[in-house]
């Protein structure tokens, strides 16, 4: 059973409400997200593109833009080396567009997930040498590629690293010793002495900032500069959502304005992707970006080559873009089936073995396509509320991906047994790794669990309630006000309210898969409301049977209950239901007890 916690952070909510023309409830919700200073509140409610941080505050940005501008003017061949996920694809596209705009001699390479593995490697450097490349520019990777960068330097290439991942380190008696590659310039806000004020940006935002700096250094006219940056903003927004960055500070502004710009994009590939997925270009949300558009791009890197996704963005003809976008959607549909099968097998392995007793799950699925290991790990993590690694049989040894919970820093914990890996990297919430042989899997499992300090409380799901609030407060006016907090996502979740003593009066099951419950409910004063629930209806029925008895639980779906016969507490948010041109308020139940 989840633990419910009501936020109890203090502030003068009435004063904030009066000063900013909002309700005290909205002021409380912002305080729950640690938005309490005047400037932070202003930026959260009314921030614009003008509020984005100066790119030159990022360590290495001045030198990187100066160096690249010189290479562009000298017509030196520049090769961008990206990555095969959405962030890597978008980063590569942003850099390619920006450098091409300045007439740079540029090409790009997206590593193949299976042939090349993650990020920079010796083979890619050797290819660049054979092709006469002068400068290698990485994006969304490079910070952990010290040996490949050393090889590039030995071949007299210039190397500029742009990345956002954690800096590799080793523990010493004096503390962490950071292991930076010997590139000509490194631009990564995670560098320990980088003064950039907001470090939780994705690789595409670092790339976007670099192009912004380059255009400024080149003396680009304001109108031209603004036009290009507006065209590139949707790609920075898409990557921010898909790389699960917190939607706070400038990330929130980038996503808010980037998704708006996406609806008006002139990029034929992006427009085609929206079209084939039936997305209304007027109402693009983080959900569309993270769960519809992003997976179509990720599917190419997982089951084929991510170069296809990049080519889609480079496409100039709408007809050709539609063909390519349709193929990407079909590829993603097949990926979904493979993922469902993999998740079912992983859950079975946990439940039918001693794995279920581990605090850190290490699951070996030898026949699973290595490209979907991360997705499976994420879904298993959600099921068991434990850090999860899914390992697969690679062409050489074992490969895998991990997904974590808030209380467990996956990268730091892996660093404690780094000698087990032939390669590893990532950050707090996600990581990738390679092991030399299958025999190392059990040792890896034992080490991760032996070192684990997670408590029962850490593993328990926590439901964070923003405000205990009567259902009667949830009117149209309040729901409109809540839209000021959008876009919602990681770090800025949709507000959650709670109410006790809610009576269930009637219910019916909806949906093609019979997985939606629609109910009529009443508060303590007898006022009635429509409520919808998208959770497990069988579990809800079992709960009601245990709490109220089978006769009462069955009577709910016959519409024969009176107030007080089936009473629950619930966590909810209010929403507007639009149907047949009519709008009504509905309560969306998230949790119950």
Image (cartoon, rainbow, N blue to C red):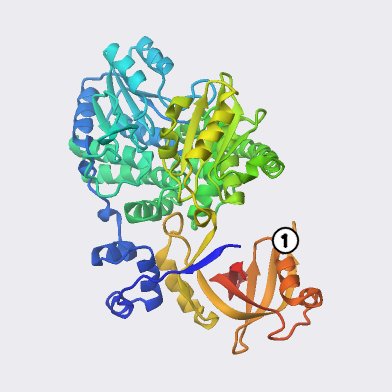
Residue situated in front as seen by the camera: 583 or 297: 297
The image shows a total of numbered marks equal to 1
- Percent position of residue 15, x then y: 28, 79
Location of the N terminus by quadrant is: bottom right
Q: Is residue 29 left or right of residue 38?
A: right
Quadrant of the image occupied by residue 267: top left
- Percent position of residue 569, x then y: 60, 75
Q: Is residue 48 left or right of residue 498?
A: left
38 lies above or below 125 = below
**Residue at 40% across, 71% down:** 8
Q: Is residue 424 visible?
A: yes
365 lies above or below 471 = above
Residue situated in front as seen by the camera: 547 or 84: 547
571 lies above or below 364 = below
Badge 1 crowding class, 10 Å Cα cut-off, few under 14, some 14 to 19, many 20 or more, is few
Residue at numbered disc 1? 511
- Percent position of residue 471, x then y: 54, 80
Q: Is residue 180 left or right of residue 340?
A: left
């Amino acid at each position: 059973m989840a633990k419910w916690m009501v936020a109890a952070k203090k502030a003068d909510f009435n004063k904030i409400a009066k000063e900013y023309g909002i309700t005290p409830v909205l002021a409380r919700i912002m305080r729950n997200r640690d938005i309490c200073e005047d400037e932070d509140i202003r930026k959260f409610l009314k921030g614009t593109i003008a509020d984005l941080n100066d790119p030159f505050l990022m360590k290495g940005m001045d030198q990187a833009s100066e160096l690249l501008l010189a290479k562009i003017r000298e017509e030196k061949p520049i090769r961008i080396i990206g990555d095969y996920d959405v962030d890597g694809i978008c980063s590569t596209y942003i850099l390619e567009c920006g450098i091409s705009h300045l007439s740079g001699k540029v090409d790009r390479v997206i590593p193949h997930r299976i042939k090349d593995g993650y990020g920079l490697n010796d083979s890619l450097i050797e290819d660049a040498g054979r092709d006469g490349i002068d400068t290698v520019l990485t994006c969304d990777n490079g910070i952990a590629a010290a040996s490949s960068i050393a090889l590039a330097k030995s071949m007299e290439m210039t190397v500029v690293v742009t990345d956002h991942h954690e800096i590799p380190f080793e523990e010493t008696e004096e503390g962490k010793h950071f292991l930076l590659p010997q590139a000509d310039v490194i631009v990564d806000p995670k560098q320990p002495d980088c003064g950039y004020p907001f470090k939780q940006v994705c690789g595409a935002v670092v790339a976007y900032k670099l192009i912004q700096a380059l255009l400024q250094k080149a003396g680009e006219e304001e109108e031209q500069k603004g036009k290009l940056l507006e065209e590139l903003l949707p790609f920075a927004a898409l990557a921010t959502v898909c790389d699960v960055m917190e939607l706070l500070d400038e990330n929130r502004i980038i996503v808010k304005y980037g998704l708006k710009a996406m609806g008006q994009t002139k990029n034929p590939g992006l427009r085609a992707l929206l079209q084939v997925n039936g997305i209304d270009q007027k109402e693009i949300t983080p959900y569309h970006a993270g769960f519809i558009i992003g997976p179509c791009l990720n599917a190419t890197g997982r089951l084929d080559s991510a170069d296809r996704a990049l080519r889609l963005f480079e496409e100039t003809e709408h007809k050709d873009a539609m063909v390519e976008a349709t193929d990407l959607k079909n590829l993603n549909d097949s990926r979904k089936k493979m993922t469902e099968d993999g998740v079912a097998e992983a859950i079975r392995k946990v439940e039918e073995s001693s794995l279920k007793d581990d605090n850190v799950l290490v699951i070996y699925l030898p026949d699973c396509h290595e490209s979907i290991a991360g997705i499976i790990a994420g879904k298993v993590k959600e099921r068991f509320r434990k850090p999860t690694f899914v390992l697969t049989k690679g062409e050489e040894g074992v490969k895998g991906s991990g997904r974590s919970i808030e209380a467990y820093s996956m990268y730091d914990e892996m660093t404690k047994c780094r000698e087990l890996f032939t390669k590893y990297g990532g950050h707090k919430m996600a990581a990738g790794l390679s092991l030399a042989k299958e025999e190392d899997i059990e040792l890896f499992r034992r080490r991760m669990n032996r070192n684990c300090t997670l408590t029962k409380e850490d593993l328990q799901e926590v439901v964070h309630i923003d405000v205990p609030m009567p259902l009667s407060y949830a009117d149209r006016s309040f729901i409109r006000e809540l839209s000021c907090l959008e876009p919602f996502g990681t770090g800025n979740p949709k507000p959650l309210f709670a109410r006790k003593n809610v009576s269930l009066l009637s219910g019916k099951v909806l949906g093609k898969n019979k997985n939606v419950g629609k109910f009529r409910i009443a508060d303590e004063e007898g006022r009635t409301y429509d409520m919808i629930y998208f959770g497990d209806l069988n579990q809800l029925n079992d709960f009601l049977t245990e709490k109220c008895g089978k006769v009462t639980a069955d009577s709910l779906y016959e519409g024969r209950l009176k107030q007080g016969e089936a009473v629950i507490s619930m966590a909810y948010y209010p929403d507007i239901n639009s149907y047949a041109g009519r709008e009504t308020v509905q309560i969306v139940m998230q949790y119950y007890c």
